[in-house]
Image (tube, helix red, strand yellow):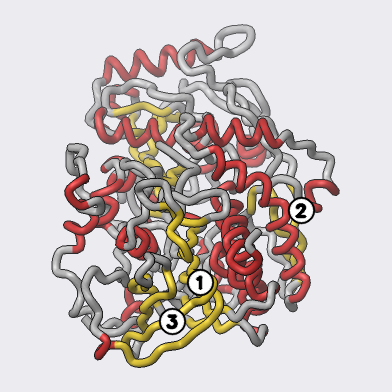
């Protein structure tokens, strides 16, 4: 299959942050690679057989994928690429595969240490769909009033992984993240953009989850003043512009890593890459950094390595199409170890079955105040819990109990300032004059739904409203509710009493995968015996050892923080041995 830039522009979904990027002259990342015909015929088999005869399988029930899923072009090739196919040989000190936040920081750090760097990026630009960066010990944090206990931070990450994370990897992130964030700020200051990193102060997480003041956001005042929450496109553009300006960084877009090259000792000495014209080799004296991201655009790989409900039930949010697990497979091919299956996914609450329902203007208010019920008519979670907690509960409700809906009444509908007709027509919203009518419309047991709503309403009859089932906070001021009602109502939840009655369907949102190759504290990739594969580094979502089950969203931006930090750590070790 011949894949051109035009083909990918035609097929790219253009929504959310991608549309915002276009408004300031940026585009959705696209891919343009050479002929794909020589690839293995059954890539799914290679994902299942990653450990050869030592592979053990976990049986799971298959679930059909969502129609919103976007499959990208897999660049990794599990075959012998002959010398006659290699068009040329280039050389450098440090080769970076992937120019997202991990790769671009790695390239910039190696460049700052005097190394000659080649950075290849599969698409038109590095992925930038993020909003902040987590870390400890930065100058921005020191300038704030926040005090972060690093041991408490480490414990929170370990708890988030159910203590499956590797402590040395967690501590490498914590101990080096402040230095990495400071480095990012220094590079931003070199650019023509006006961007300042600052340490936020988060509200208490609640519900027995710790609050770690590790989030760093970006104040953007040039070239435009940008106040939307999704800011990653601007620091990424600034960092990339500095990389492009440096004489010792060769940034090559539309160029994908295909295979790693090893010498007789097993040391990784470079890679075979591919662009529109074909294959060529890059030799790297000091090492290769795999910064290729996750694999949320590779359906076969997700089927092999994820729980079905984690990718098949949620709405897929990210518009990027380059994250297909190329780095995972390149590493595994040379003997790397990897996080155990099932892998960890980044899933949040607040998703919808399709793009049309995602745009429903009722969603903010309804999500803020309404109870959730499943297909059996029962509440099944604390709707105000952290995003990853509610996401798991939503996936369970859809997988085992027939779906999930918010239930609300006319008082909530009266706060809507836009017409809702098309959202009733497309099934996002449903209406019943009575709860019996609404239950019939949804196909759920009427008596159970009425019992559930009666119980919910009863919580508000107490002197201090109290959720006796899931401990939801029913009384604190909710700024969303305050805004929608012009200050007339401020509660964080509302009863469901005045008909007609309404429902709004919902699901989790799937963003990416965050499990990968096992690394040590220097980001060197380890083999299945725990030995270092010399010359090979991994970072960001291509690396492992940090997460298990579900990404801990209540610890803001550890994913982006990990990516930037491990790009920095890998480059520092490759160039300085530190």
Question: Marks 2 and 3, Cα distance to the nearest angstrom?
Answer: 38 Å
Location of the N terminus by quadrant is bottom left
Instruction: For the residues labelled 3 and 1, say whether their Cβ atoms are less than 8 Å apart.
Output: no
The reply to whether the C-beta atoms of the residues labelled 2 and 3 are less than 8 Å apart is no
Q: Earlier in the sequence, mark 3 or mark 1?
A: 1
Q: Say whether residue 86 is left or right of residue 521.
A: left
Label 2 element class: strand
As drawn, 1 above or below 54? below
Neighbourhood count class around disc 1 (C-alpha, 10 Å): few under 14, some 14–19, many 20 upward: many
Residue indicated by mark 1: 96
In terms of sequence position, does the residue under pointer 2 or pointer 3 come before the other? 2
Query: Which residue is depicted at the point 60% across and 81% down?
Result: 116
Q: Is residue 424 visible?
A: no
Compared to 424, does 115 lie above or below? below
In the rendered image, residue 372, in percent from the top left (x then y), is placed at 41, 28
Q: In the rendered image, which residue does mark 2 sit on?
A: 198
- Give the mark count: 3
Q: CA distance from mark 2 to mark 1?
A: 28 Å
Q: Out of 401 and 95, give the one closest to the viewer.
A: 95
From the image, tell me which residue sits under label 3. 282
Relative to 447, say whether 190 is above or below: below
């Amino acid at each position: 299959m011949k894949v051109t830039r035009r083909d990918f522009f035609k097929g790219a979904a253009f929504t959310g942050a991608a549309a915002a990027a276009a408004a300031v002259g940026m585009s959705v990342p696209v891919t343009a690679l050479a002929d794909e015909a020589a690839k293995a015929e059954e890539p799914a088999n290679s994902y299942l057989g990653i450990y050869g005869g030592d592979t053990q399988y976990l049986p799971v029930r298959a679930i059909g994928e969502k129609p919103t899923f976007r499959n990208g072009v897999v660049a990794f090739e599990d075959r012998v690429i002959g010398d006659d196919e290699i068009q040329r040989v280039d050389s450098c000190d440090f080769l970076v595969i992937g120019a997202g936040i991990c790769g671009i920081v790695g390239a910039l750090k190696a460049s700052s240490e005097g190394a000659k760097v080649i950075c290849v990026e599969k698409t038109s630009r590095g992925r930038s769909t993020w909003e902040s960066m987590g870390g400890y010990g930065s100058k921005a944090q020191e300038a704030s009033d926040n005090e972060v206990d690093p041991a408490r931070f480490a414990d929170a990450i370990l708890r988030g992984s159910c203590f499956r994370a590797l402590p040395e990897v967690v501590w490498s992130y914590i101990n080096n993240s402040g230095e990495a964030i400071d480095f990012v700020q220094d590079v931003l200051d070199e650019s023509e953009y006006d961007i300042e990193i600052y340490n936020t102060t988060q509200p208490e997480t609640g519900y027995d989850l710790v609050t770690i003041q590790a989030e760093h956001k970006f104040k953007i005042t040039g070239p435009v003043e940008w106040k939307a929450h999704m800011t990653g496109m601007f620091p990424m553009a600034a960092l990339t512009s500095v990389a492009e300006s440096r004489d010792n960084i060769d940034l090559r877009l539309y160029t994908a890593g295909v295979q790693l090259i090893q010498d007789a000792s097993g040391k990784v000495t470079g890679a075979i890459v591919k662009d529109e014209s074909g294959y060529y080799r890059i030799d790297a004296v000091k090492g290769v950094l795999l910064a290729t991201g996750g694999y949320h655009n590779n359906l076969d790989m997700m089927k092999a390595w994820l729980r079905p409900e984690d990718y098949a039930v949620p709405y897929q949010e990210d518009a990027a199409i380059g994250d297909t697990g190329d780095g995972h497979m390149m590493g595994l091919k040379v003997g790397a170890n990897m996080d155990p299956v099932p892998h960890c996914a980044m899933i949040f609450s607040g998703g919808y079955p399709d793009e049309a329902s995602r745009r429903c203007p009722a969603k903010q208010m309804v999500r803020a105040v309404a109870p959730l019920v499943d297909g059996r008519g029962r509440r099944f979670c604390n709707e105000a819990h952290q995003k990853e907690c509610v996401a798991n509960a939503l996936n369970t409700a859809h997988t085992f109990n027939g779906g999930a809906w918010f239930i609300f009444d006319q008082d909530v509908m009266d706060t809507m300032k836009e017409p809702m007709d098309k959202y009733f027509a497309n099934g996002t919203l449903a209406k019943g004059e009575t709860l019996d009518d609404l239950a019939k419309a949804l196909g759920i047991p009427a008596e159970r739904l009425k019992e559930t709503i009666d119980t919910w309403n009863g919580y508000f009859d107490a002197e201090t409203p109290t959720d006796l089932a899931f401990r939801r906070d029913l009384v604190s001021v909710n700024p969303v509710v305050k805004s929608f009602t012009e200050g007339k109502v401020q509660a964080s939840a509302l009863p469901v009493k005045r008909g007609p009655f309404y429902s709004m369907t919902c699901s989790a949102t799937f963003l990416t995968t965050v499990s990968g190759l096992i690394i040590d504290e220097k980001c060197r990739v380890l083999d299945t015996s725990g030995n270092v594969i010399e010359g090979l580094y991994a970072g960001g979502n291509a690396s492992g050892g940090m997460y298990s089950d579900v990404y801990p969203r209540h610890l803001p931006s550890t994913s982006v923080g990990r990516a930037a930090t491990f790009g920095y750590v890998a480059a520092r070790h490759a160039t300085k041995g530190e």
